[in-house]
Every structure is written in C-alpha cells, then in structure tokens.
Image (spheres, rainbow, N blue to C red):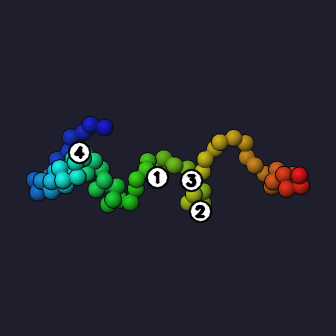
Amino acid sequence: MRTTIDIETGSYRLAKAIATQRGVSLGKIVAEAIQSAYGQTGPPTSDILRSDAGFPVLTLGRTITSEDVAGLEDE
C-alpha cells in the first residue's frame, strides 16, 4: 500500500541506511519496525475470531461432535 508519512530526519536517515545495507525497501524497514514494536506479523487481531483461550477459530465445514468422534473410535 502506498502512503505518505512525516518522519524525523534522523529516523529517516537511520531507516534508509538500514534499508540500503540490507538491500530492501524503506517501506519494508518501516513495516518491520512497526510489526516488531507491536508484536504483530499477521493481519490485525481484531479481524480474527478467537476462542476464549485465545486460539484462532476457523469455520471449514460442519461442527464435529463428541458422538462423531465416539462413532469413529468404535470402528
């Protein structure tokens, strides 16, 4: 995504030097810094449905019940 931000000259120079040294874009360095500072590498957690225990909840088909599992154990 393309955007414009205001950044201190010193911060810009440091980020630009790191980007040049690593051979990546300035945008990648800024994105990595933000992700590192906030501990997030995926989509925002508010967009992901989570269980009470904090695990991601995925809906891929019908719900598997205890009876389903018991039926398969008997086979």
Q: Most extreme residue toward the bottom, as rendered? A: 53
Kindly identify the amino acid type of the residue bearing the numbered disc 1.
Answer: Thr
Of the numbered discs 3 and 4, the one sitting upstream in the chain is: 4
Give the spatial CA distance, label 1 vs label 4.
26 Å
Disc 4: CA contacts within 10 A as few (<14), some (14-19) or many (>=20): some
- Mark 3, residue position: 56
Residue 42 in percent (x, y) is at 43, 50
Residue type, label 4: Ser
Give the crowd class for mark 1: few <14, some 14-19, many >=20 residues within 10 Å: few
> Which residue carries the number 4 mark?
25
Q: Do the residues labelled 1 and 4 touch (CB within 8 Å)?
A: no
Residues at circles 3 and 4 in contact by the CB criterion of under 8 Å? no
Q: Quadrant of residue 35?
A: bottom left
Element on which disc 3 rests: loop
Q: Nearer the viewer, mark 4 or mark 2?
A: 4
Is residue 74 toward the left or the right of residue 25 in the image?
Answer: right
Q: Residue at x 24, y 47 (%)?
A: 24
Q: Residue furthest right?
A: 74
Residue drawn 81% across the image and 54% down it: 69
**Separation of residues labelled 4 and 2 (CA atoms):** 38 Å
Say which residue label 2 marks: 53
Q: Quick check: marks 3 and 1 in contact, CB under 8 Å? A: no
Please tell me how many numbered marks the rendered image carries: 4
Precedes in sequence: disc 1 or disc 4:
4
Q: In the rendered image, which residue does mark 1 sit on?
A: 45
Q: Which amino acid does label 3 sit on?
A: Pro
Q: Distance between the residues labelled 2 and 3?
A: 9 Å
Q: Which amino acid does label 2 sit on?
A: Ala
